Image (cartoon, rainbow, N blue to C red):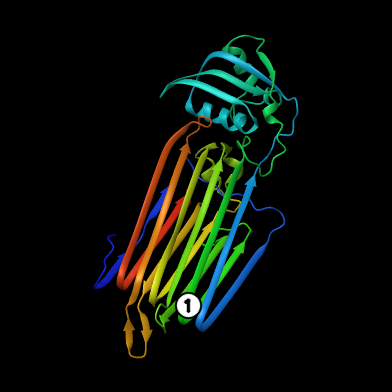
Amino acid sequence: MKHIQFGYITLLLFGMVVALTGIVCADQVVPAVPEIQSLSTSTAVDVVGLITETDAGTWTLTNDPGVNKPGSTFYDYTGAQEANTELINSMVAQLEPVGGKVVWTGSGTSLSVIELYVPESLLDTPIQTGSSETFQEYGELMGPDDPTITTSPSINSPGGIHTGALDPGQIQYTTAYDANIVAQAGHTSFVKSMNLDTRNKVLGQSNIDAKTALTYIATADGGNVVGSENILIDGAGMNTTASDRMLCPFAAGTAIVIPAYCNIVQAGSTYDLTVGSVTTNANDRFVGNDATNPVVLDYDINVKPYGTTAGQIPAIGSALAYIKADIQEGRVNGTVKDEDLTYNEQSSAQGSITAFTKVIAYQSGKALL
């Protein structure tokens, strides 16, 4: 929106929803750790003079199965063997979470597997549900009876939070929240609630939930209130199996693999007022047991007139709200990136503001409703 330097401004900016769905789901919630924490604060202030409020926090959570099998043996079959999409999905679901690999060529109904990298522990496992053919038997049809045998050190991860490349089957999230308010030389009424809960959450619940309500009017020259708020969620995941991550049996039957992804979304606002009322709401959810419950980030801000017994005084000053998103998604073919989406949106107003409302809602995944 253009900055308006004079007159009255009425901005009704309703809604932005980013909903991303993969074969079954895109981002998937991370199960809570066994020991959970809950932190809540409530602040209420009514003062003429100076008030400050500062909030800042980051939280990283991972679900890393690790693969504690030092020296595990892998069998590398090469050649070519006819396949179909269902069969390839089944192989990917079984092999990639433990460091294995499936390489195929072709498209549509003409598919052929050209390489299988199979851990010794899965050689006698059926290549798909209901099949009597094992990975070893399928691999021998592709080429030599004596495949290349290797030992992969990449599967010796103990799991847990770490930097660098994710482990096979790992998902990891970081969320961050910060807010800062300074009001001086005026009458301020301020209420804020902050709730952080590390437990598994379902639809309609939040892991971080911050609500703020503020009214301000300057009582001296130079009086103003300045505020800023930001919330971020950063999630990355390798290919993982779907059947053990979904409560609904019908959802698990629609696909075998939850594809790899790497998604970052941030939203927030700033304002600088000499008079006015401001309410904000920031929340997200990314902890849970059921992958059909999507990852969510919501943010909204409402700047409106200051109420008095004599009537409404329009807010005076400036306000801004934004969202930034960088979305990267795969399908079922390992860590190949099949989607790359970047989005930025910003709305601002300056002058005498009668209404400024922006609602932002991000959802990644698929909820069965």
Tag 1 residue: 184
Q: From what the image shows, is residue 321 above or below residue 263?
A: below
Q: Say what secondary structure mark 1 lies in.
A: strand
Q: Is residue 358 visible?
A: yes
Q: Is residue 44 above or below residue 346?
A: below
Residue 369 visible (yes or no): no
Q: Residue at x 55, y 56 (%)?
A: 176
Q: Position of residue 361 (x, y in %)?
A: 42, 57
Q: Residues within 10 Å of mark 1 (few under 14, many from 20)?
A: many
Q: Is residue 312 left or right of residue 79?
A: left
Q: Could you tell me residue 90's position as x and y percent?
A: 56, 30
* 317 relative to 160 in the view: left or right: left
Q: Quadrant of residue 239?
A: top right
- Mark 1: which amino acid? Gln
Judge by depth and name the residue closer to the eye, 29 or 129: 29
Residue 24 coordinates in the image, percent (x, y): 49, 42
Residue drawn where x is 51% and y is 83% of the image: 46
Q: Name the residue at the bottom extreme.
A: 309
Closer to the camera in the image, 108 or 228: 228
The residue positioned 46% from the left and 40% from the top of the image is 328
Image quarter hosting the N terminus: bottom left
Please identify the residue farthest to the front as the structure is shown.
221
User: Image check: 47 left or right of 200?
Assistant: left
Residue 120: image quadrant is top right
User: x and y percent of residue 32 in the render?
Assistant: 65, 53
Instruction: Report how many numbered discs are placed on residues in the image.
Output: 1
